[in-house]
Image (spheres, helix red, strand yellow):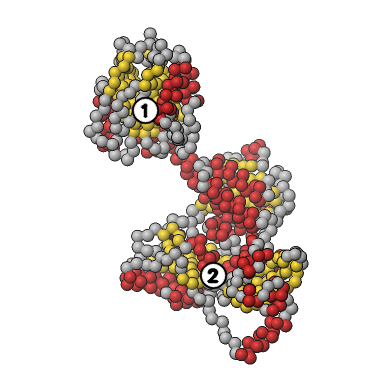
């Protein structure tokens, strides 16, 4: 395996790579071999789930070669990778295919100056290398019955440098010592393997203290983010890097890093602050990398909690604008062949209203970017007008970035960031912005799916709940429904009032487990069944028993609580049966409260032959019957009996002549609902 891995890296021209295996029946790839990069740099991806948004996962899952030709290309498609490695490099990922199955994946890395496209010869080397490695992994599986998935993968040693003769070694040492300043060498892990006396003097440390150490550990003043960042940039991009750092109290030193396959050569010279050559070292510009990474991590964590499109827009604006120093933001998406302004911050609504619902015109930057997937950066309005001659300067901004929102490899919209003052976009910042847009795009895609499900569930539930309750003589009724404050805001709570004949009626209330389309659908089936059995004349216990058999036959995997009451308006008597439901409350005409202690019975859908008890009670004019779901009384840390007693106290203080006011009071004093709430108040009239 080691020799096959070394061969494919060498023959493809890559500087390094990662080898993964896929154990049979596993849902994740395990990193087993690292070449050309430190293990610490590859550590975030030691285990990669097959559904993770990673190049190697896509390559293995889809059985194809994945190519990303540069930093911005990586940031558009795989923002997580680009956030951790925001450097210039190219990447190929391919599946290891044996004669019988996919056995793993191979990732190869090239320097940042690699051509934009993968060459045919390189592709052929990769395909042959993957076949060979796949066969080796298959043979390991046949021999041992398992594949290695150790926590720490092996590291291939770098190519051995040529060993100089003693005469050459002496000449090289003299040559290095004659150079001004100092020199040292680092291995691929960043440890110092060689240091001249001049370098040790500039660093203010002994040579023995430096050898074998990491610079930022041996020299505390080098433990600043941009030092290790430039070291990592040199390793990943294989390009010269430079930086300046202060050695306390007042000595500035300039460092130049020259990487190759075996490590880094470093030149150290006395310098002054600001001596770096920006065109060659490409230092960070705009917000510092540490600042941007902090806001990226915070944005990523907050976006995981965003449950709707507007949540995503608000969280993005809250995090991005202060982090990037931008003053305006617009989120756009296509909808039915037109441009939709999904949300914005820092712009006047009347300006954006002119673009909302307009045709998808590629003369508008946001439309062009969302169709091509290529970001646009304009540091002046003249640059913007050169690209889009018809665009007017209406927003008063001075610089713009328009970024594609990518989800599942396709643009789903665009994100415009606007700056009130002139702003340049160096390569590092462009990649960071593109990565940010990738996170926003994935969150927006999830949020749109959530909103679509919410809308569907809400329409389904609205269609299944009664729009109005029937008018029944000699009966006053008030009903309320309040969706949960979190989740999809749609569940399985229902209520119903059924007119049976001139002198009798029935009332039902219930709660289907869950907050989704399945719960709403089952709610409609349960409500229909209760209605059918009630109109057929079944007593309360039979209504619940028959409905229970139906729910068991449907086998939805959900359970339902239900309370059913038969009302005799002529005799002012009622009969109630419960299926795992909270007890009804009765406020008697004299103000006295009573909790109807009916054996609750099993929830509907558990046992097909379950039987239910019933209880008869008086319900004369002036009394109030309260049926409710558990969302009205249940709250974390609150005893249920205490909550029901508190609800009874509110009912006792209410006015039976104003059921609507009483219902509003009960709902208003309910705990912040983590569950839906349904309430039905019934009062016989004289």
**Numbered badge on residue 214:** none
Label 1 residue SS: loop
Q: Seen from this angle, which residue lies furthest bottom?
A: 167
Please say if the residues under marks 1 and 2 sit with CB atoms less than 8 Å apart: no
Towards the viewer: 557 or 356:
557
Residue at (63, 56) in percent of width and height: 290
Give the quadrant of residue 464.
Answer: top left
Tell me: residue 348, above or below residue 282: above
Residue named by callout 2 = 37
Give the quadrant of residue 97.
Answer: bottom left
Disc with the residue nearer the chain's start (1 vs 2): 2
Q: CA distance from mark 1 to mark 2?
A: 63 Å
Towards the viewer: 280 or 617:
617
Mark 2 neighbour density, 10 Å: few (under 14) some (14–19) many (20 or more): many
Residue at (74, 67) in percent of width and height: 252
Horizontal and vertical percent position of residue 22: 39, 64
Q: Is residue 326 left or right of residue 548?
A: right
Can residue 119 be seen in this snapshot? no
Residue named by callout 1 = 582
Residue at (55, 56) in percent of width and height: 79
Horizontal and vertical percent position of residue 574: 31, 17
Q: Is residue 546 left or right of residue 79?
A: left
């Amino acid at each position: 395996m080691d020799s096959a891995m070394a061969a494919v890296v060498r023959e493809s021209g890559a500087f390094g790579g990662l080898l993964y295996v896929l154990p049979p029946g596993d849902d994740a790839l395990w990193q087993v071999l690292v070449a050309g990069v430190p293990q610490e740099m590859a550590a975030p991806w030691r285990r990669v789930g097959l559904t993770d948004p990673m190049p190697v996962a896509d390559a293995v899952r889809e059985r194809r070669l994945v190519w990303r030709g540069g930093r911005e290309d990586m940031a558009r498609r795989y923002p997580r990778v680009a956030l951790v490695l925001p450097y210039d490099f190219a990447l190929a990922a391919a599946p290891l295919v044996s004669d019988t199955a996919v056995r793993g994946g191979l990732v190869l890395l090239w320097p940042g100056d690699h051509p934009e496209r993968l060459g045919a010869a390189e592709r052929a080397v990769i395909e042959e290398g993957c076949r060979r490695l796949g066969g080796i992994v298959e043979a390991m599986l046949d021999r041992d019955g398992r594949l290695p998935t150790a926590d720490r993968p092996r590291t291939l040693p770098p190519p051995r440098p040529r060993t100089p003769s003693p005469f050459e070694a002496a000449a090289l040492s003299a040559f290095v010592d004659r150079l001004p300043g100092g020199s040292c060498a680092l291995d691929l892990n960043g440890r110092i393997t060689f240091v001249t006396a001049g370098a040790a003097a500039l660093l203010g440390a002994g040579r023995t203290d430096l050898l074998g150490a990491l610079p930022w550990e041996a020299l505390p003043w080098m433990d600043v983010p941009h030092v290790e960042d430039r070291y990592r940039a040199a390793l990943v991009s294989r390009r010269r890097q430079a930086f300046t750092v202060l050695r306390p109290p007042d000595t500035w030193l300039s460092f130049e890093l020259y990487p190759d396959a075996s490590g880094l050569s470093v030149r150290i010279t006395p310098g002054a602050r600001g001596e770096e050559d920006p065109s060659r070292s490409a230092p960070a510009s705009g917000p510092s990398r540490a600042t941007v990474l902090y806001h990226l991590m915070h944005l990523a964590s907050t976006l995981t909690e965003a449950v709707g499109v507007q949540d995503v827009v608000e969280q993005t604006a809250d995090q991005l604008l202060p982090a990037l120093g931008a003053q305006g933001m617009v989120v756009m998406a296509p909808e039915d062949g037109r441009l939709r302004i999904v949300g914005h911050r820092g712009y006047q609504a009347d300006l954006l209203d002119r673009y909302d619902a307009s045709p998808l015109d590629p003369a508008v930057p946001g439309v062009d970017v969302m169709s091509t997937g290529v970001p646009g950066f304009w540091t002046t309005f003249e640059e913007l007008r050169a690209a889009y001659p018809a665009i007017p300067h209406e927003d008063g901004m001075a610089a713009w970035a328009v970024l594609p929102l990518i989800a599942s490899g396709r643009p789903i919209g665009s994100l415009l960031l606007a700056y009130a003052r002139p702003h340049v976009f160096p390569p590092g910042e462009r990649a960071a912005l593109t990565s940010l847009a990738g996170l926003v795009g994935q969150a927006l895609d999830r949020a749109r799916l959530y909103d679509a499900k919410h809308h569907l569930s809400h329409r389904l539930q609205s269609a299944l709940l009664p729009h109005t309750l029937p008018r029944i003589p000699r009966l006053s009724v008030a009903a309320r429904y309040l969706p949960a404050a979190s989740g999809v805001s749609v569940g399985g709570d229902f209520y119903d009032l059924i007119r049976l004949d001139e002198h009798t009626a029935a009332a039902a209330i219930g709660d289907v487990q869950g907050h989704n389309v399945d719960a709403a659908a089952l709610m409609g089936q349960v409500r229909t069944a209760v209605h059918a059995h009630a109109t057929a004349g079944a007593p309360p216990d039979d209504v619940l028993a028959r409905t229970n058999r139906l729910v068991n036959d449907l086998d939805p995997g959900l359970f339902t609580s239900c309370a059913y009451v038969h009302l005799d308006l002529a005799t002012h008597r009622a009969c109630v049966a419960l299926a795992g439901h909270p007890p009804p409350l009765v406020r008697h005409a004299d103000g006295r409260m009573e909790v109807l202690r009916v054996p609750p019975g099993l929830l509907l859908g558990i046992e097909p032959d379950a039987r239910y008890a019933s209880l008869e009670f008086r319900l004369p004019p002036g009394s109030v019957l309260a049926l409710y779901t558990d969302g009205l009384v249940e709250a974390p840390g609150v005893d249920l009996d205490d909550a029901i007693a508190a609800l009874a106290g509110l009912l006792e203080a209410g006015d039976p002549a104003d059921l609507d006011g009483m219902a509003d009071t009960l709902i208003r004093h309910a705990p912040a609902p983590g569950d839906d709430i349904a309430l039905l108040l019934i009062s016989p009239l004289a």
